[in-house]
Amino acid sequence: MLLALLALALIAMVLATPLALRRVERWRAGRAPRRQANAADFNLELYDPGRERRAEQRARELLRSCVNAEEWGMYRDLGFIRVAGRHARREIDRGARPAYAYLVYPHKPIVAYVPESGQLLSEYCVEFPDLTGTGGRHRLPASDDMLAKWMALTSDEDRVIRRANMHLVGRQLDPARVRRDLWRLAEWERRRGNRQQVSQSQR
Amino acid sequence: MKPGHGEVLLAEGDPRVQEDEERLVDEFRRQLDEGMWAAVPVRNAGSGRREAQMVKEYADIPPDSERVIFFPRASGG
């Protein structure tokens, strides 16, 4: 009797196996698209913590190779670059000292000011967004942003100023901090002038 | 300049060699079509100071320039 029951169970199992396999295959086929969709959701580029640092190092070298030695020193020591404005109200104003200049910061607005008086004029918010259509998650390394602003201002000042959003100083930058930067710049230039005088007298 | 990556070499070659020049022209046009700005670092003949020169055509590139830098165009931030 027991042997007969075991034989029946074995036969039932053998008959049921193809049915069970078909159900498992159908279930797996149903899950595949969902699994692929989930995988696509998580198919993010692996984050490389050194990439941004390496990009910034390359950007610093590129900036150094493009700007004047004085501007490079300014950026290295102070973190910003002064770019002279090209326009003058009167022809007589076209002297050695520009009528106005810009302080260019990386990833911050450009500040226009009057070098003669130190008066802050306005801030120009400008950025160089990702045009590759990868979602705009990335931005230029700081030194590349600086170089892009420098190239845009020294080559076509009007175009970059036209594209920027102009505000009174204080919208994004603290005017007190900008005035302190102007003071730091004046001190830096004084020290640099002294060093140059010393090196010239030693020759 | 590529956001998130920094400097990327797009193409290099000798513009005096026809094959190289064609490749450089193609890359130049492709970058400008993608909306990039192109600038060449130059030295001002008068003041001797370094500055950039924006170029909109391949023919505008000064013949003695070593490189053209492409960067995303500026927009209000």
Image (spheres, helix red, strand yellow):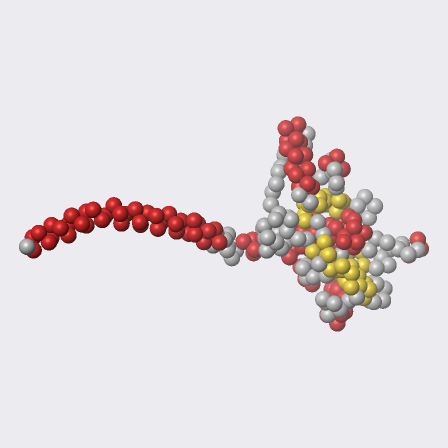
Pinpoint residue B13: horizontal percent, then vertical percent: 63, 34
Q: Position of residue A203 (x, y in %)?
A: 75, 54
Q: Closest to the observer: B48 or B16?
A: B16
Residue at 88%, 55% in the rendered image? A88
- Looking at the image, residue A45 sits to the left or right of residue A183; the answer is left
Q: For residue B62, what is the image quadrant?
A: top right
Residue drawn at 59 percent across, 55 percent down:
A137
Residue B64 relative to residue A88: left or right = left
Q: Residue at the far left: name it.
A: A1
Query: Looking at this view, is A17 or B31 the one in front?
Result: A17
Q: Position of residue A48 (x, y in %)?
A: 50, 55
Whether residue A105 is visible to the viewer of this picture, yes or no, is: no
On-image quarter of the N terminus of chain A: bottom left
Residue B74 shows in this picture = yes
**Residue nearer the viewer, A69 or B55:** B55
Q: Residue furthest top?
A: B18
**Residue name at image x 79 percent, y 45 percent:** B44
Left or right relative to A168: residue B37: left
Q: Position of residue A114 (x, y in %)?
A: 84, 63
How many numbered discs, if any? 0
Q: Residue at x 76, y 59 (%)?
A: A165
Looking at the rendering, which quadrant does residue A149 occupy?
bottom right
A132 or A60, which lies in front?
A132
- Is B11 situated above or below A138? above
